[in-house]
Image (cartoon, helix red, strand yellow):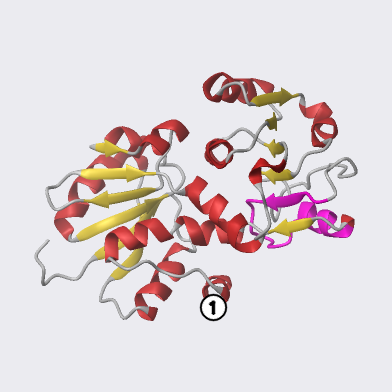
Amino acid sequence: MSKHSIPLAGVIGNPVAHSLSPRLHGHWLQRYGITGHYVPLEVHPDDLVEALGAMGRMGFVGANVTIPHKETVLRLADQVTDRATLIGAANTLTFRPDGTIFADNTDGYGFIENLRQNATDWDPRSGPAAVIGAGGAARAVVVALLDAGVPEIRLTNRTRLRADQLKSEFGGRIVVYDWAHMNGMLNGATTLVNTTSMGMEGQPPLKINLDELDPKALVTDIVYTPLITPLLALAQDYGYQTVDGLGMLLHQAVPGFQRWFGQRPEVDDELRNVVLG
């Protein structure tokens, strides 16, 4: 890309029309007076290799990656960060001037930064964390919690095998609970995270009893439609501290934007309001 061309970035997915990323990055481009564009890119899995090969030549400096491409791009990138390798997925690509593709996963970073910003006294080392779900999002959350110093992660998933696989990969600090014994894993937990789609608009709510959580527990849900999920509403009724999932989306976008456009963007209330429309 010549120094006179306008930098482009976008989000690659299938489907992608629902993505909030164009609104998010578009706001930052405008706020910082950066000449650049961020666009939704609907790419069919069969066309992914061809699309990625062309993007660098078309003036793209980077892209976010969403369903169903997050695992595939890991194999197609020339260089991959350790955390993306651990998680087994990438959500942030950088197209370098030499034609190579650099892949990272910033989901775990976004998850932790959201908690640090919105629950300033949260201490990951204060006690066990209970994590519901063992899919792709859970992998990013588990890696981030282990990095942050959580002493024990209690994990449950509808299909126990997936939770057991996570334990075999990430080791000794993970204890797997049967789905039927979910309430038991909350005993004394100081952090509770829902990484499943349960409680999302159109999905059944999570059936859970929060009696046994530590009184100072923090409850968070990575779903942000609705912002206050049934789990967060229940936790608020109990008096626990809660953090909604929108901040994870906002914070995971920061490292990519900084890499592509050379400006570290701020996550604040104005941005939240813009993204919520």
Image spot of residue 244 (x, y percent): 67, 59
The local secondary structure at tag 1 comes to helix
The image quarter containing residue 258 is bottom left
- 19 lies above or below 189: below
Q: What residue sits right under mark 1 in the picture?
A: 270
Identify the residue shown where x is 68% and y is 38%.
Answer: 131
Viewed as shown, does residue 7 lie left or right of 159? left
The question of residue 236 being in magenta is answered with yes
Identify the residue shown where x is 52% and y is 40%.
Answer: 140
**Circle count:** 1
- 87 lies above or below 203: above
Q: Which residues are magenta?
A: 216-237
Quadrant holding the C terminus = bottom right
Image spot of residue 7 (x, y percent): 22, 66
Quadrant holding the N terminus = bottom left
Image spot of residue 111 (x, y percent): 56, 51
Viewed as shown, does residue 255 lie left or right of 35? right
The image quarter containing residue 173 is top right
- 206 lies above or below 59: above
Residue 41 appears in the picture as rendered: no
The amino acid type found where label 1 is placed reads: Glu
The question of residue 11 being in magenta is answered with no
Residue 94 appears in the picture as rendered: yes
- Return the residue nearer the eye: 83 or 56: 83
Image spot of residue 231 (x, y percent): 78, 51
